Image (cartoon, helix red, strand yellow):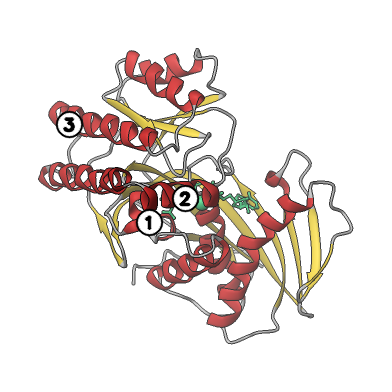
Amino acid sequence: MTVSSAPGKVYLFGEHAVVYGEPAVPCAIERRATVTVDARADDHIRVQARDLSLDGFTVEYAGDTAERPDVDVPEGLVDAAMGYIDAAVEQARDAADAPDAGFDITVESEIPLGAGLGSSAAVVVAGIDAATRELGVELSKDEIADRAYRAEYDVQDGQASRADTFCSAMGGAVRVEGDDCRRIETPNLPFVVGFDGGAGDTGELVAGVRDLRAEYGFAADTVESIGDIVRAGEERLYDADPDSEPTADLLAELGRLMDFDHGLLEALGVSSRTLDNMVWAAREAGAHGAKLTGAGGGGCIVALDETPETRTALRYTAECRDAFRAELDREGVRVESSGDGTAAADRGDA
Ligand SMILES: Nc1ncnc2c1ncn2[C@@H]1O[C@H](COP(=O)(O)OP(=O)(O)OP(=O)(O)O)[C@@H](O)[C@H]1O
Ligand SMILES: C[C@@](O)(CCO)CC(=O)[O-]
Ligand SMILES: [Mg+2]
């Protein structure tokens, strides 16, 4: 049995525009998806995903033929869920040259689904890590990030950037521009997350921006302007001392750019009334800046505030279901236990 976990993320800025080759800066946060994988003697895949709905479900199938004895959730949801896990299994089989490998898989997660915190990337990254280790293959973090990207790309019909999967695999703050992915050192940024209890469909939201961009030059300009915001923000990050607390100037400037980014995302049609209300509640509470994170449509906002004020204000905001401080995760994917159940040693970066 092998257990691996991987973190979710928030976007400091750059989501959506990153799909069209602009840079983005996502940051891994200390909320994890944990995937337990047990090799089977046959080629069946059995999945338990209790967080996927209120009831959770179990699916067992072999090859392409789904047999769903215990399913009590809508079929579309099952298909959506199985897409990411299937794709992770395919990547692991390919990496280990074991096309007929079967697994019992359990997914547990602290990351709300479809809420902009990268639950899909975390599940895929942890799943590929656990399944390949279970087959005796140890991939570097870079290889896991690459295979996880291919899995998300397939499930999202070619509409995915490398940002979420690279960030989840490597941990920390990262910068992604097309195929160029790197870690960047930043001071500890005081992220506060507000969650409206809802979700957005990443594929649909990305398709909406793609259509707007194709129809209107000014929508394409808006996407480019998001890239300009990221370029301005990263200059400030490179100037900052990663080993010190962020200065008031840095927080003020990053916050201003986050506000600007949210305005442009709103213009591109990916915000919602509840996300906007949480953004305004955070700003009025004194946050340096606030924006939606991830695909949008519903789910989470991220604000910058080193005090408890924003969190408290969000908790008193009607549209907000949950508000929490999100610490930067600097570790990325990690193995929790493998083989005989002993905690495995840390693996170095590739
Ligand atoms: N705990 C889980 N168990 C099983 N599947 C999960 C779990 N968490 C996420 N997933 C898979 O990820 C899908 C959600 O991915 P989606 O990309 O739509 O949202 P997200 O990754 O949470 O947000 P974003 O991409 O905006 O950051 C779910 O439909 C499911 O297929
Ligand atoms: C909306 C998007 O930019 C981020 C989703 O978390 C899509 C992607 O990068 O694949
Ligand atoms: Mg996702």
Residue 331 shows in the view: yes
**Cβ of mark 2 under 8 A from ligand 2:** yes
Marked residue nearer the N-terminal end (2 or 3): 2
Residue 346's place in the image compared with 228, above or below, is below
- Alpha-carbon distance for marks 1 and 2? 8 Å
Position of the N terminus, as image quadrant, is: bottom right
Q: Residue at x 14, y 41 (%)?
A: 236
Q: Nearer the viewer, mark 1 or mark 3?
A: 1
Circle nearer the viewer, 2 or 3: 2
Q: Residue furthest bottom?
A: 97
Q: Which mark is residue 253?
A: 3
Verify CB contact (< 8 Å) between mark 1 and mark 2.
yes
- 271 to 319, vertically: above or below: below
In this image, 31 relative to 267: left or right? Answer: right
What's the amino acid at mark 1? Val
The residue at label 3 has a CB less than 8 Å from ligand 2: no
Dot 3: element: helix
Q: In the rendered structure, which amino acid carries the disc numbered 2?
A: Val
The residue indicated by pointer 2 is 206
Residue at disc 1, CB closer than 8 Å to ligand 2: yes
Which x, y percent locates residue 186?
22, 45
Please, what secondary structure does the residue beneath circle 2 have?
helix
Three-letter code, disc 3: Glu
Indicate whether 57 appears above or below 335.
Answer: above
Counting residues from the start of the chain, the first of labels 1 and 3 encountered is 1
Judge whether residue 336 can be spotted in this image: no
Q: Nearer the viewer, residue 89 or 226?
A: 226
Helix, strand or loop for disc 1: helix
Return the residue at label 1: 19
Instruction: Tell me the distance, in whole angstroms, between the alpha carbons under discs 2 and 3.
Output: 28 Å
From the top left corner, tell me how far across and down residue 210 is, in percent. 42, 52
Task: Tell me if 200 is positioned left or right of 25 in this view.
Answer: right
